Structures are given as C-alpha cells and as structure tokens.
Image: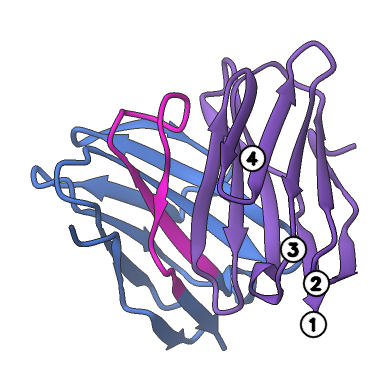
Chain colours: A purple, B blue
Amino acid sequence: KNEVEQSPQNLTAQEGEFITINCSYSVGISALHWLQQHPGGGIVSLFMLSSGKKKHGRLIATINIQEKHSSLHITASHPRDSAVYICAVYVVGAQKLVFGQGTRLTINP
Amino acid sequence: KAGVTQTPRYLIKTRGQQVTLSCSPISGHRSVSWYQQTPGQGLQFLFEYFSETQRNKGNFPGRFSGRQFSNSRSEMNVSTLELGDSALYLCASSGTGTANTGELFFGEGSRLTVL
C-alpha cells in the first residue's frame, strides 16, 4: 500500500462545478503540499499545510492531522484548471517528500 | 525575480553513458532538491542539498549523485545510464530550508531519454 493515496485518479467535470480531490496518508508528517502539473511537466506549488485550512482565490485546501487526510477544493471550476494535482507529504524522520500518484482533472467548457 | 532554471531541457543519451543536469535556484534560496518522475513510479525524491551539504538521499542506486556549489547551483549526475533512467528530472528550491517549512519552487525539468 502506498504511503500517500489520492482519489479519484481521474476526474472529468463541467465548467462551473465544485471539485474535490482527496489525499490520505499513512505516515507521520510535518507538512503537506498540494502541487499542480500542467502538460509539459512544469509543477507549481499551490499550498503548503501543516494544520487547518488555506484559501487562495478559487482554491481551498484543508488538512485533518488526526484523520491523516487532506482535501483540495476548486470552486467555479474553469477549463484552465485542467491539470494533474499532486499531494506530497513531508515524512517525519525520513526528512523527504513522498508523493501521491496524482489526480488528472479535466474541466470541459 | 528569476525562477528556477534547469538545463538542458531535453537530452538523449545511450545506455552506458553518463549525464549531468544543472539546476539554478531562485536567488537567495539555499535549499535545492531533486526528483525523478516516470509514468510508472510517479514522482520520487532523489536528494536534497542545503548550503553545499547533502541532507538526505532517496532510494536510488549509487549511480545517482549530486552536489551543490557555493552559489547554491546544483548538479546531478547519473552514470552508466540504463533504459529505466528515462524520466523527467525536476529540481525545486526553497527559501526556508526544506519542504518541511516552506513553499517549493520547481523548475521546468530536464527530460532524459535513454536509448
């Protein structure tokens, strides 16, 4: 079993829909990152969380340390949100990032 | 402020050769980390450098090595290339020390193809 699991693996939605991507992990962490990767490879950091909730524009990220779970929400989704979203956790002790397998999001106009 | 710069962007090598990839972090950032991305394994941590010292290394064979210079630029080297080394190699810099404490800024990656 992977240390970081994301769901769903693929998600297709219509423009304007509310999107939720989930990340569960099984190890002790000190931080969790949400990353966005567009075709071509470049990765952009969206959020770094160690507790609670963060909001940036239409994106909201939450983390529940006790339940070892994080969610990324996109409100009023737009075709430009189409990308792969990756959850990564900084593992206590190992001092390294461990990545989920990614969620491929497609927003249709 | 210039972003993280990786060179070369694309390269093709043959089995048995070696390759060196370069990463220039954002000015002022002293932490550089390297990652390998393949369709089968996804993103995997290679190593992290801070102020010229390797802080940690991922589960990769000794053929994978790296270093960081006094100006924080980093290089990674892969010797005796194998077909399975074909991947996108990404580096990231952080202004706060590690991915534990700060946002990561990624380069566009170096796409290596081994024939």
Q: Does B100 sit above or below residue B77?
A: above
Marks 2 & 4 on one chain: yes
Q: Mark 3 highlights which residue? A: A77
Which of the chains bears the disc numbered 1?
A
Q: Mark 4 highlights which residue? A: A88
Q: Are marks 2 and 4 in contact (CB under 8 Å)?
A: no
> Of the residues shown, which amino acid type is indicated by label 4?
Ala
Q: Mark 1 highlights which residue? A: A109
Q: Do the residues labelled 1 and 2 touch (CB within 8 Å)?
A: yes
In front: label 3 or label 4: 3
Measured from the top left, where is residue B115 in percent x and y? 57, 88
Q: Is residue B58 left or right of residue B76?
A: right
Say which quadrant the C terminus of chain A sits in.
bottom right
| Comes first in the chain, label 1 or label 3 | 3
Judging depth in this view, the residue of A15 and A26 nearest the camera is A15
What stretch of residues is rendered in magenta? B88-110
Q: Are marks 3 and 2 in contact (CB under 8 Å)?
A: yes
* Label 2 CA crowd tier, 10 Å (few <14, some 14–19, many 20+): some
Magenta segment includes B103: yes
Q: In this view, does B84 lie to the left or right of A72?
A: left
